[in-house]
Image: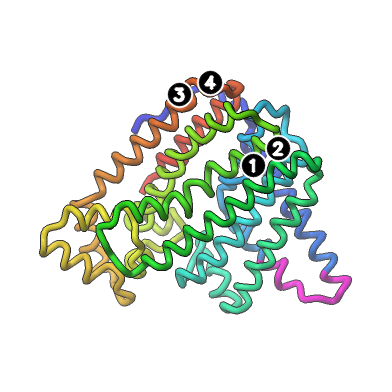
Amino acid sequence: MTTTTTSPFAVDVDAARERIDAALRDFLRDKACGEAELRLPADVTDAVREFLEAGGKRVRPLFCVLGWLAAGGRGIPPEVVRVAAALEMFHAAVLIHDDIIDDSDTRRDRPTVHRAVGTDAAILIGDFALAWSGELLHTAGLSAERLAGVLPIVDAMRCEVDYGQYLDLITTGRPTRDLDRAFEIIRYKTAAYTVERPLQVGAAVAQAGPEVRRALSGYARPLGEAFQLQDDLLGVFGDPARTGKSNLEDLRSGKHTVLLALALRRADARQEQRLCALVGDPELDERGAAECRDLLATLARDQVEQMIRNRWLRAQRALTEAPFPPAAAAALRRFADALAVRSV
């Protein structure tokens, strides 16, 4: 895949990321002060702060900022930064709970929250992050009119990701050829939640018109799918030293991915038997995982990579006639490259 070439990156993404991180730090500092005054344990704010500081690309809050700029917003005012920070706080809650559901050991090269403090405590810590994401949003300083435009999008995003998680849960460990269901999980769990809804939130703060909203969706939907398809490849073929996550967990749990569904569709009887025996085995070892990777690479990896390329191209083409300011369009092009062209 050849990445696009653009004029210099006019939107200072690093500066925006630093401001979002500062907003999160300030919010948690205030929470810690409140806890101290009430003599409440500092464990909760410490756990959320450590989780946020462990890394993460801040993809969703940055898409929120880019949605604001794509809709003609000027600069990056404090209220946009705080709305963006609310999305990252929500993402923290989702990941903390997701790691419990998946029984994951590591996240960003560190023990997952439930491994560090226990499952019961991690559930509550995730709940705190969820509540605080709402507080960040409601205290961002938006006018009543703008908040009214943002809230339905945020509500839809929260329900979509929960439905996606639920679909993921009820299909895990049940390998099938059902490609439609695999894409349904992607659309609910990742595509809208990672790209489209954050862009729409930022655009809603700027009170974008229908033409801008349509153009954002035309870019976001294929890119969101490409992002998750690439994530599925990383979950199987990625180097844990680079990704910060195990490349065994998805195989052991038997995640219902497009990669697996395609492989089962193309497998002969022997290959299908081996895949069904290996994928979803909680005791799967490195030898079995290597066999599984060989089968998946032979049967489906190239096709998934082509799907990623096709969706990346659709996202890039959607920007060609989009009514966005040039700097915002250039930034969105760079983001498409960064999300869809990640090394496994």
**Colouring used for the render:** rainbow
The image quadrant that residue 8 belongs to is: top right
Q: How many marks?
A: 4
Give residue 210's position: percent from left, percent from top.
Answer: 60, 29
**Is residue 259 visible to the viewer in this orientation of the structure?**
yes
Tell me residue 52's x, y (percent): 63, 58
193 lies above or below 78: below
Residue under pointer 4: 7
Going by the numbered disc 3, the residue's amino acid type is Thr
Q: Closest to the observer: 337 or 64?
A: 64
Question: Dot 2 surroundings within 10 Å: few (below 14), some, or many (20 or more)?
Answer: many
Counting residues from the start of the chain, the first of labels 1 and 3 encountered is 3
Find disc 3 in the rendering and name its residue. 5
Amino acid marked by disc 2: Val
Asked which secondary structure carries label 2, the reply is helix
Q: CA distance from mark 3 to mark 4?
A: 7 Å
Judge depth for marks 2 and 3 and give the one in front: 2
Q: Are marks 2 and 1 in contact (CB under 8 Å)?
A: yes
Secondary element at image label 3: loop
Mark nearest the camera among 1 and 3 is: 1
- Is residue 330 or residue 180 the one in the foreground? 180
Examine the structure image and report whether residue 271 is included in the region drawn in magenta: no
